[in-house]
Image (cartoon, rainbow, N blue to C red):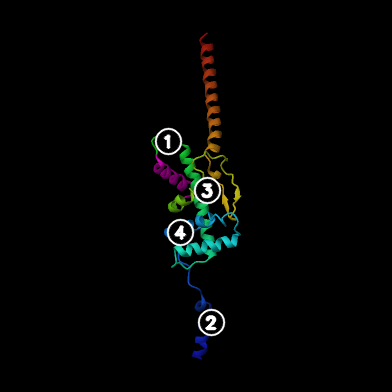
Amino acid sequence: MNTENTALSAQSPAATRSPRTPNWSKGDDIKLCEAWVSTSEDPIRGSDQKYEALWERILQDFKAREPERQRNAINLESRWRIIKKEVSKFCGKFAQAKALNPSGFNEKDIFEKAKLFYLDDVKKEFKLKGCYKILSTHEKWICNIKESPRKAKGTKRALESADGDDVEDIGEETVQGNSRPEGRKKGKALEESRKKINDMMKTIVGAGK
């Protein structure tokens, strides 16, 4: 009887369950971004890689950088989507902070301001600084922080890149799109105030006659 129980126990799901995938560290995230950049910039295959083949190559590159990490292509792709979403969002916040053009601010100051914008919007701290530094300078990453954003807040579009991966446009967090409507509102309010003052002055002058 004990022998049968032992056999059943050995065949149970708990006994055959695969090891749990370790949590992602900051170093793992950076290595993944480096692997993605390295693979997608391959001058021979970079612009002509099928989706599955791309992630298999990214996996091999990642393993070369982190040989002790037991991960598969699905793990990497899943984590990449999270990184891509959060860094894209932060790129928009950085562009927003940079467009304010505060006097005396340097890149570090702008970065800290962008973190505050991100925290206010997402309600959590931005913790992918290492990934941002790698991706924001990558030619295929939609994050041109040196140019003014072009799209109005709330708009998105997915750009299908050559590697089969879609990257969210950071235009969802624009300053230019927001500042123009605000400028019109302020101008209209100012004009209304002037009109009221003029009307009041006419009334006062008329009463004095």
* Secondary element at image label 2: helix
Residue under numbered circle 1: 102
| Mark number, residue 11 | 2
- For mark 2, does the 10 Å Cα neighbourhood hold few (<14), some (14 to 19), or many (20 or more) residues? few
Looking at marks 4 and 3 on the same chain, the residue that comes earlier in the sequence is marked by 4
Image: magenta residue range:
106-124
Label 2 to label 1: alpha-carbon separation? 65 Å
Of residues 35 and 205, the one drawn nearer to the viewer in this rendering: 35
Q: Identity of the amino acid at label 2? A: Gln
Instruction: Indicate the position of residue 203 as horizontal and vertical percent values.
Output: 54, 15
Circles 1 and 3 in contact, beta carbons < 8 Å: no
* Secondary element at image label 3: loop
Label 4 to label 1: alpha-carbon separation? 34 Å
Circles 4 and 1 in contact, beta carbons < 8 Å: no
Q: Identity of the amino acid at label 4? A: Lys
Q: Identity of the amino acid at label 1? A: Pro
Q: Identity of the amino acid at label 3? A: Glu
Residue under numbered circle 4: 31
Instruction: Indicate the position of residue 109 as horizontal and vertical percent values.
Output: 39, 42
Residue under numbered circle 3: 139
Circles 4 and 2 in contact, beta carbons < 8 Å: no
- For mark 3, does the 10 Å Cα neighbourhood hold few (<14), some (14 to 19), or many (20 or more) residues? few
Of residues 112 and 182, the one drawn nearer to the viewer in this rendering: 112
Circles 4 and 3 in contact, beta carbons < 8 Å: no
The residue depicted at 50 percent of the width and 90 percent of the height is: 3
Residue furthest out toward the front: 44
